[in-house]
Image (cartoon, rainbow, N blue to C red):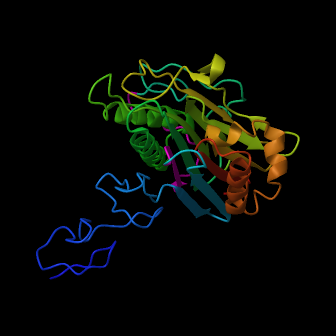
Amino acid sequence: MAAICPVCSLEGLPGERFCEECGTPLGATLCASCGAGAVDADGYCGRCGVRQPTGRDHAEIELTAGAVRVAGVSDRGLRHSHNEDAMALTVTAVPAGPYAAVPAGTGDPVAGPAGWQGGRDAFPPPAAGGTPGGAGHAVVGVVCDGVSTSPRPEEASQTAADTAAAVLAERLAAGADAVAATYQAVAAAAGAVAGLADSLFDAPACTLVSAVVDPRHVTVGWVGDSRAYWLSGPGSALLTQDDAGPGHVLTAWLGADAGEVVPHVRSFAPEGPGVVLVCSDGLWNYYPDPLALAQAVPDAAADPLAAARTLVELALQAGGRDNITVLVIPFTGRR
């Protein structure tokens, strides 16, 4: 069957692979930027060199958790050619409390899996004996930011986000404590990202921040400088502490060259409603202050998707120098 050249519209002969008139591969996809070049197998235009947009350049998620909506938006920003951030958002049913079940061989619910350090600190822990109450839903959100100086950062971030979210959902559904589940999720994500490397000199890398919002508690875990915030008027607060030194240099990440990965995990029981915001540095580089973030999206609990879009748009208007990813998860205590 003859093919039409996508550039000069010359009809080729059956079996021809290239246009006789202009040399364009027949059947090729045209560049979304210049409209005249063929896109190669790696996604770049052969004429202008622009990398073609993908589904990750701007992505949105909106889910329902009981009576509550949750949402996320990820955008490549204005300076990067592609989006190295990744996000995962899911809702899982959790069994009736207490959530005290700890998988065999992982130690107590605070210490996490054997060989890991860190702990539940800085915030009041859940009541002894676990979380009381009936069955409900827990929202799991993960944001990962690919390290741009590493190879295939977008592959690292997507692998980490998907792995961590899947492990968190599976462990919570099995009745695991959110703190123990978070340690397991970060360990699994770290292993998965390390497995992408061909060597220590070819090691994809990323940061990770996760949030579990169940009917009683908020639990966050992180490695690197992606952040989680609690937004609740004057009581708004930053929930994470960056693994970064002077000059914004990362001191911890996921990857085969990361050495021992030591996740931070913290949990607290909110005294009232609020919103958990999980984000990459594409947002907080411009808006680091918790109260300013809360004031920017006062209706975030009622319309999380609109709030996520607003925060991404604010970062774009401020310069959009980096990829931007935002998850908005309301806490009502009634989920």
Q: Is residue 281 visible?
A: yes
Which region is colored magenta? 82-105
Residue furthest to the front in view is 21
Could you say which is closer to the camera, residue 61 or residue 333?
Answer: 61
Horizontal side of 260 relative to 91 (left or right) equals left
- Residue at left 15%, top 82%? 1
- Residue at left 68%, top 55%? 308
Could you say which is closer to the camera, residue 233 or residue 94?
Answer: 233
- Residue at left 42%, top 28%? 106
**Residue 92 in the image: above or below residue 97:** below
Give the image location of residue 90, x and y in percent: 52, 55
Give the image location of residue 75, x and y in percent: 58, 52
Residue furthest to the left in view is 15
Work out which quarter of the rendered image holds the C terminus and state it.
bottom right
**Where, by quadrant of the figure, is residue 65 drawn?**
bottom right
**Where, by quadrant of the figure, is residue 226 drawn?**
top right
Could you say which is closer to the camera, residue 120 or residue 50?
Answer: 50
Could you say which is closer to the camera, residue 70 or residue 281?
Answer: 281
Residue 200 within the magenta-colored segment of the rendering: no
Give the image location of residue 158, x and y in percent: 43, 45
Horizontal side of 11 relative to 37 (left or right) equals left
**Residue 158 in the image: above or below residue 117:** below
Q: Is residue 333 visible?
A: no
Give the image location of residue 199, x and y in percent: 28, 25
Horizontal side of 164 relative to 22 (left or right) equals right
Q: How many marks?
A: 0
